[in-house]
Image: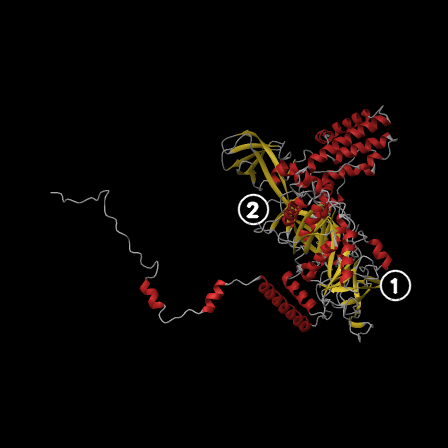
Amino acid sequence: MEEHRHRSGTFKQQNKPFKSGKHDSKGAIKRRTEGKVETRKSIKSLAVVPNRQEILRQKASKMNSSKKADAIERKRLGLPDLAEPRIVSIIPLTDNVNIENIKTLIMTKYGMDQSNVMVDQSSSSYTTLCLGSNGKTRITLLVCNSREVSEMVEFAKVSDIILFAVDVSGCSQQVQQQQFAEFKLDNQAERLLSVIKAQGVPSSMLLMQGFEQVPVKRRNDVKKVITATYHFQFPGEPKVLPIDSEEDAQMVLRFLETMHVNEILWRHMRPYIMIENMIDIRKGSVAIEGYLRGNHLNAKQLIYIPEIGDFQIEKIEKLKDNNVKNQHKNQSDELVLLDSSTLEERESIDCVNVPDLNEQEQTMPSNEEIEMAQKKIRVPKGTSEYQAHWYLDEDGGLQEEAEEDDEDEEQVYDQEMNEDLNRQDEMMNQEMNDDDVDDHPIEGQLAGAGEEEEFEDLNIIQDKWKGVTKDDYKKMLKEKEELEMDDERERSDEQNEMHFPDEIESPEDFPCRIRFSKYRGLKSFRTSPWDARENLPIDYARISQFHSYNQSMRRSIEVQNASPVKYGTLVRITLVQGQGPQATILPTVQEIKARQTTKQAPIIATGLLRYENKVSVLHFSLEKHRLYEPPVKSKEEVVFHVGFRKYSTRPIYSLSAPNCDKQKFEKFLLPGRNAMATIYAPITFVPAPLVVFSDSSCSELVATGRLVSVNPDRIIAKRILLTGRIAKAISRKFAVVRDMFYFPEDIDWFKKVELFTKMGRVGHIRESLGTHGYMKCTFDGTMHQQDTICMSLYKRVFPKWLYDENGVKIN
């Protein structure tokens, strides 16, 4: 009999669970607090919150302690009692901003509060103010009266604090119509802010001019919108103040006195001065004066002046600082020698090495090379020496021409055809020359026929020019140039490169084994070995290379930090011209000012760390700016601003692959994609910001980025993609491919290179079929008739050398 089991129903009794451990019982609390008495002080401390006066007192106490600690630290390091004046620049972000009015308000309010105003006598644009009751906080006020990006960028490079000024008087009408929803900046302001964020953001403040003209009821709304726009660009900078009255100027001065100055690392690593005065000492010697900033300085290192060059230091002297509120009565006006150097102690001015061409390896010529040198080529009777080179090009001329230009698939038409229009014979020769150089349909007809057909076609071309007048020829030439421009636009279009990267067409009339002899096939771009010291150009004998870049940088910084001349000192530096053929001629003061492209911006002189004047291979990480629309090609001339240095160069672009020792060459700097730019340039230690402009006037901002490394061994490989199509499918995995090669010898030459398709198949060449470039291939899967067959070939490319044998930059 089955045992009966009770099953609980709906009305089952539910007992409370035991809640042990969630709280203490009354007895446990009593036992734990037995014998303890709560004090009145503890209860008061928990109930009373410090008032505002107490908070301000604690804040002031902390600031005083910080100032005392800073003074003790400056004394321990041997620095001057007073820090160098902070450089404050007033830069307009909108039109119709009266910069001089802002400066006048600040100076008027300062003159009412202070009895003395120090103005630099060498330039009316420099004004040094001593703020505070003790005058220990000093500022040098700079005014940028131009809205040119080139001017504003130079002010931003040297500024410790930037006062951005905007005109809001035009917002009153929009506010009354309730149309003021956002404050838009123009393209110039957008480019300037992008440059500042790329170089390093100093402390900043936004000043609103014309704020009194806004209706009182709408002022808070206007300020909120402008503050939101400003904080979107610079988060964490809350100061947005009006500047229309003396009370507003007093508020600005108060914030300038207590504002924290952001430290920009790349400026703090190197000594630099804003030149406040220059003196001609003698021919080949100029003295510059200013406050030493950033880092310490010694007389053995080099000084770089933008757009002028690198120079050696003869001596460094200390000047009397007149921009001090409480002067010592016994302070002397005489110059104090801080450091000097002899000719042997100074760092070398040479930037490039001079290679000895006699030390290159030279092997004995082989029998094949001797036969090629002695080879005679038959040409038709009456052929001139100039025309004979066309026949020589069939063996190797086109190969050398392709090596000159990295864009192997883009040949350039001969422009000499435009000169002598009156001589029809010369025009015919030039037209034939164009057809030989470029992939013109006539060239395929001439090259595909035999010798007899070739001379017959030549007579046809000569008959074609009979009766052609000069005007007809000009019209034909114009039509041809328009077609060439259209083709050039198609080849250089960024969109084509994005949709069909690296694809080229094989030449039908020239062997690919000669045309692409510099290229090689790789089984795997990531893992296949490639010797970094193989087939280097002669330019690599002129550059410098580190055994360990990081170790050399650390040692250079250690030597710099131990320099005797401390930053914060008002100094006079006597510059002299270097010795040797690579030395730059030191111009006079007037010539230095005349060479500056920015006439209003201050001139900066920066001390170079050890090795920073040597030329090497620099790699930058950069991204194209969103406001720049024209395509940017590799080896196209642009202007680089690397820290305080600026120079024109022709970079090559590549894609960065962290897990690969090779980087893929890019024809264009594509938008929305991070790329690497490689150039020959003077060595710079990281960190260093990069700003790229289209020309020296800084009219268009091309890209922004940073320095990544100095490494000549970094391999940049250019890829070309030969494509073919399926002519016939033999079976599921076998197919006959055409249009990739046109000579059976080319098929045998590239037989070992792996094939792949755009639909993901991998294959190999089995054999050549016939004499027209057909080949039998096998693949690892089923083939589709619409699939495209591809072959990747690579060759290493190098940046363009822009220095002559004396190390002088070639313009």
Task: Residue 445 in the image: state x and y as whole percent.
Answer: 72, 29
Task: Residue 112 in the image: state x and y as whole percent.
Answer: 77, 61
Q: Is residue 43 above or below residue 222?
A: below
Q: Is residue 762 visible?
A: yes
Q: Amino acid at mark 2?
A: Ser
Q: Is residue 259 above or below residue 226?
A: below
Location of residue 352 (image quadrant): bottom right
Q: Residue at x 70, y 72 (%)?
A: 78
What SS does tag 2 mark?
A: loop
User: In the displayed structure, does residue 355 sit left or right of residue 53?
Assistant: right
Tag 1 residue: 283
Screen quadrant of the N terminus: top left
Q: Amino acid at mark 1?
A: Lys
What SS does tag 1 mark?
A: loop
User: In the displayed structure, does residue 28 sit left or right of residue 106?
Assistant: left
Earlier-in-chain disc, 1 versus 2? 1
Foreground residue among 16 and 461: 16
Real-space CA distance between mark 1 and mark 2, rounded to the nearest whole angstrom: 60 Å
Which of labels 1 and 2 is toward the front? 1
Task: Residue 249 in the image: state x and y as whole percent.
Answer: 73, 56
Location of residue 744 (image quadrant): top right
User: In the displayed structure, does residue 532 sit left or right of residue 317?
Assistant: left
Foreground residue among 424 and 42: 42
Task: Please identify the residue farthest to the top as the structure is shown.
Answer: 467
Q: Is residue 472 above or below residue 67?
A: above
Mark number, residue 524: 2
Task: Residue 695 in the image: state x and y as whole percent.
Answer: 76, 46
Task: Give the class, few, some or many, for how many residues have Cα within 10 Å of label 1's Cα (few <14, many ≥20).
Answer: few
Location of residue 272 (image quadrant): bottom right
